Image: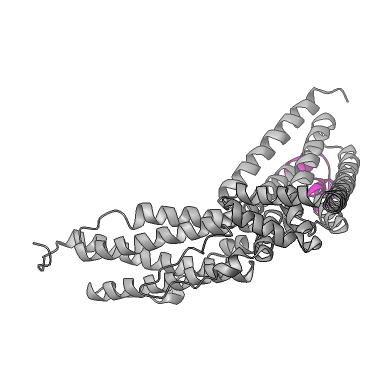
Amino acid sequence: MPGETQAYNPPTLAEARARLEKAWRGEILAGAVYELIARRMSDRDASILRKMAEAEGSHRRRLEQRMTELDVPIPDPGSVKVPLWLRLQARIAPVDRLLAAREAAEDDEVGDLYRRSTGDPDTDRLLREIRHEERAHSLAVQEIRSGGAADQPVVDIPAAGAAPMPTSPAVERDPRARLDRIMKRERWHRSGGGWISGAIYGANDGLAAVFGIVAGVSGATGGSTFVLTAGIAGALASALSMATGAFLAERSETEVAQANVARERQEIAEHPDEEKEELSLFYQLKGIDRVTADSMAEQLSRRPDAMLQALASEEFGGVGDKGDPKQAAVAAGVSTGIGAIIPVIPFIFTTGTAAIVAAAIISLIAHFLVGAAKSLVTLRTWWAAGLEMTFAGVLVGGATYLVGLALPT
């Protein structure tokens, strides 16, 4: 009967104990990851994530209480470490992608760790309670990723009796606050470690391109001194091409953005009523009722600069925070040059078969390392990304070497 003391067989207790410890470790890790992500966000959204981190701490204490009841030793919390790779990803990867990963992790915890029965009614009851709160975390992450709605309060984060997080509907409905949130959200899509992610992809391009050149010329000449000449020329050409390409791309983006802003400013001056209606429609498409949207647009229209920022954000992603062309050029050029010179290094010291074999080995090792580094931005498993890049290097090197063998020398 419900409420009566039940005798549990050893396998049932073993499952409950294992699940409790796994959940306990997961709560500590989740709280630490939320804190790392919060450091890169605006004050408002960071406070949401920190509230979620506090809720994870509450879950941990409730799990510890049940573990004590079942005589499960509570490990040292210091033994739960955020993996170094995850720490690096939290600092480098785009914030929007990190939030998507946390949302997926919360859903996985709800679906696997907390939903399956352990056979212990009291443990199952505790896990069900935490499961509902973890689902609320997932919804909160969804709200942050989508930018929320100006006329809706923030999703409350339950934390075992804690008071709901305070919200301020008046502030949330203020057009300026809404504008700031939109602008912050748009910046997240452009954040991804900036020059770091550009450097990783530059090294990837330089390494792959020059490895193909070295392999092809090695096949055609048997690893002669021509490989060194071709490799250095290829590395230099790749670095300069990537640097100039990155510089022109960033400058073009900035020029286009400036032209768009200038045109939008002119339209506000010449057709204020039409632009005000346009802004209201943008807000209505986001789910805001017409009266509120009209009111927001009307208030913003009294401050032309604020209205310009709002329209620019809705139409083409904002008025500032574009990339630095010089920084992009240096990052792309230097990283491409470093990646490109790797396959050439053995031919600086020797030639022939020994140089070919050495170039293949160090190039494939470099392919793996660059592929693993890309996972800092893509959030893929590092070894899977590394192996994929290595396999691509084998294909490129093998194909170009065979082409070189077939070419006349």
* Left or right: 248 in relation to 389: right
The stretch drawn in magenta includes residue 224? no
Q: Nearer the viewer, residue 344 or 2?
A: 2
Please tell me in which quadrant of the rendered image residue 131 appears: bottom left
The stretch drawn in magenta includes residue 343? yes
Residue 202 lies, in percent from the top left, at: 77, 49
Please tell me in which quadrant of the rendered image residue 241 appears: top right
Q: Is residue 27 above or below residue 361?
A: below
Q: Nearer the viewer, residue 140 or 276?
A: 276
| Coloring basis for residues | one colour
Q: Nearer the viewer, residue 347 or 302?
A: 302
Residue 195 seen in render: no
* Left or right: 213 in relation to 54: right
Residue 282 seen in render: yes
Q: Tell me which residue sits at (20%, 62%) in the image.
A: 120
Q: Tell me which residue sits at (73%, 57%) in the image.
A: 310
Segment colored magenta? 337-357
Residue 133 lies, in percent from the top left, at: 38, 63
Residue 135 lies, in percent from the top left, at: 41, 58
Quadrant showing the N terminus: bottom left
Q: Tell me which residue sits at (80%, 54%) in the image.
A: 335
